[in-house]
Amino acid sequence: MLSLPTFIVSNMRKVGAHRWARSLGAIAFSGLGFLMLAPAAFAHHPLGGRLPSNFFEGFLSGIAHPVIGLDHFVFVIAAGLLAALSRQGPMIPVAFVVAGLAGTGIHLQSLALPAPEFFIAASVLLFGVLLALKKSPNWKLVTGLGAIAGIFHGYAYGEAIVGADMTPMVAYLTGFTVIQLVLALGMSAVGRAMLKSHQMSGLPLRFAGFAICGVGFTFLSSVMLG
């Protein structure tokens, strides 16, 4: 059985860059439509707003939050694809996740960050732009930006765990750390597989970047327009 990255590259070679670009465009438009229909409350409360009361619920909530929170999910995907562009790239999602823990800690200490939803949406748009660039951005710069973004994303994660007991809280932190690393490193592997296709070079990742830009712009517009 083919692995996911091998399957993707194999199909990319068959259909060619043009059809692959059209497929990405279709996925992007479908995603944007879903974003406009998805309830904001659901995206930020994996247990329907109820605090997790045990280890299992805490871990489940931690895993779910970065996935059903579409702004977080798209950012993690972008970070993973950017990580594919350089040997040191995996430092990008690692810095993001570590900073996310710090951001959650800030929220749990009842400290306020300015306009977290704005900066989260802006981070999605920014990482889409960086991915869409013809020349790969410096990994150190992207790592630093990922860490800054992580603080705001982590701050938002903290909302779902404020007031919980220590056991579900630790499980929650573990859950969202694990799932984000798995998603980001998995997408990095997919991105590297795409880059090994000599016919298209980095074009598929740039197309993905444009799609992510559209998602980020949608989120940012929603935040600014209320």
Image (tube, grey):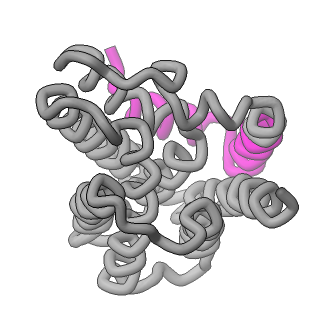
Quarter-wise, where is residue 176 in the image? top left
Q: Quadrant of the C terminus?
A: bottom right
Left or right relative to 18: residue 106: left
Quarter-wise, where is residue 52 in the image? top left
Magenta span: predominant SS is: helix
Q: Position of residue 125 (x, y in %)?
A: 65, 66
Q: Can residue 171 be seen in the rendering of this structure? A: yes
Quarter-wise, where is residue 119 in the image? bottom right
Q: Which residue occupies the foreground of this view, 178 or 10? A: 178
Residue at 64% from the left image edge and 33% from the top image edge: 41
Q: Position of residue 156 (x, y in %)?
A: 46, 52
Left or right relative to 107: residue 81: right
Left or right relative to 137: residue 24: right
Q: Which residue occupies the foreground of this view, 168 or 208? A: 168
101 over 15 or under it: above or below = below
Q: Position of residue 154 (x, y in %)?
A: 37, 55
Q: Position of residue 89 (x, y in %)?
A: 29, 67
Please check the rendered image and state whether residue 17 is part of the magenta-colored stretch, yes or no.
Answer: yes
Q: Quadrant of the N terminus?
A: top left
Seen from this angle, which residue lies furthest right?
225
Residue at 81% from the left image edge and 30% from the top image edge: 37
Q: Which residue occupies the foreground of this view, 168 or 17? A: 168
Q: Can residue 93 be seen in the rendering of this structure? A: no
Magenta stretch: give its range. Answer: 1-30
Please check the rendered image and state whether residue 7 is part of the magenta-colored stretch, yes or no.
Answer: yes
Residue at 60% from the left image edge and 60% from the top image edge: 117
